[in-house]
Image: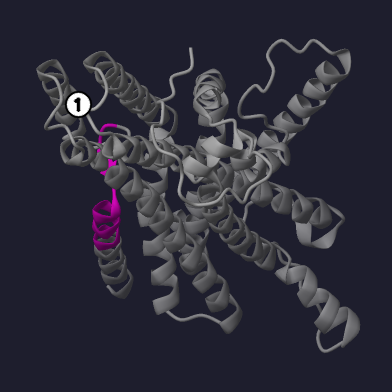
Amino acid sequence: MVWKLRTRTVPTSPITTMKTIPLKSFFRYVDIFYLSIGMVAYDRNSKDSNPKRNWRRIMLRSYFIFQMINLNLVLLSELIYVFLAFGSGNNFLEATMNLSFIGFVVVGDIKIRHIWGKRERITQVVRHLQDMHPVSVEQQTIYKLDEYLSGYRSVSIFYFGMHLVLIWTYNLYWAVYYLILDFWLGIRRFERMLPYYCWTPWDWKSNWSYYVMYISQNLGGQACLSGQLAADMFMCALVTLLVMHFKCLGSQIERHVAGVLPAKQDLAFLQASIVYHQRLLLLCQDINEIFGVSLFCNFASSSFIICFVIFQMTIGDNIDSLVMLMLFLFCAMVQVFMIGSYAQRLINASELIGEAVYNHDWFLADLRYRKLMLVIIQRAQRPSYLKATNLLKVSLVSVTDLLQLSYKFFALLRTMYVQ
């Protein structure tokens, strides 16, 4: 059953959008990045039994399994390198640099596995949002759907583009180095290097396995990046839709004038508002159950990554490494601030419901109406949060706490290195 409030006012702004915006427009980039690793985050049509589509699912599943095996083999080789470096006391700087990348890969691996395990729950959330999605041009104008989609797309393009520039600048650095300095200019003999330090039981520098490992690390880096970014932007898309519904509900309540129409119609309006509000709260709980682990990994790894990247930058290194580290640090900072800002928008939008109920013209309403108002006001006193499991409520305040924690880790690591 679709719950939508009846609007008693006509929008004052002219309708400029001639085409309706489908819900899938918010998930377009997310779907592309998940498909790049052979993954489908939610079922679009569970009743489809087309043999061609079944064959496509088998191919995607096989490609996904290949990507995950390759990603975890790359991660294992990096971990072994770090353990051996710390155990022997050699290559300490390279090992600490690897720790930053390992943190990024581990989080990406966990996110991919967790989202894959929550596919049925995600499908239910998407279908609930599809039921609530405004379908006509007039409704979408009231909801300001085009503004929310435009803002979300701008953030997505910036977020995806920035990380793609980072990962491929780093991954292709040695290939470009070879083409320009050795192959083209002939300045010096090219020493074979991989994007990430790793351990192997054979000498990969002297045979064809170097090229296989270079491609393998590039594929693993892109798979990790796709899984990380798609999960973040998928959550932000769902939060954007929730914020849109919260604000539209608040504006509809605030425009309502109680006591003009019969009491039954006023009660029906408020009851529909309560049901609508409750449905949004349940969707917020579903989103937290789906992305809670992902959020916790984001904040835990970001503290870890920021600490080790700043440490690498302060101890000094060649200019090439410093540029890569600065890009990596910038991306980590953007990630936590973006998630924190979307979480803060959700908090602010959910708090507006109580204010809207109190501010609307309820003075002439029936006594039953005024008593029923207390139900939605009381619930709106507890804002909706994005939760990194039950350990942390995400907001801009928690981002500040994260930066403070990162600095403490950095100070400790710096002290250990000096001593």
Magenta segment, prevailing SS (helix, strand or loop): helix
Residue, x 44% and y 54% (percent of image)?
87
Kind of residue sitting beneath label 1: Gly
**Of residues 374 and 70, which is closer to you in this image?**
374
Q: SS at mark 1? A: loop
**In this orientation, which residue lies closer to the viewer: 207 or 349?**
349
Residue beneath label 1, please?
259
Write down the quadrant of residue 308 in the picture: bottom left
Front residue of 338/74: it is 338
* Residue segment shown in magenta: 390-405
Q: Above or below — where is 377 with respect to 158?
A: above
For the question of whether residue 129 can be seen, the reply is: yes
Q: Name the side, left or right, on which 86 lies relative to 253.
A: right
In the rendered image, residue 316, in percent from the top left (x then y), is placed at 46, 81
Q: Residue at x 53, y 45 (%)?
A: 233
In this rendering, is residue 354 above or below 403? Answer: above
Residue 90, visible in the rendered structure: no
Specify whether 200 is left or right of 294.
Answer: right
Q: Residue at x 81, y 16 (%)?
A: 54
What residue appears at the point 60 percent right and 38 percent down from the top-left corner?
137
Q: Is residue 410 magenta?
A: no
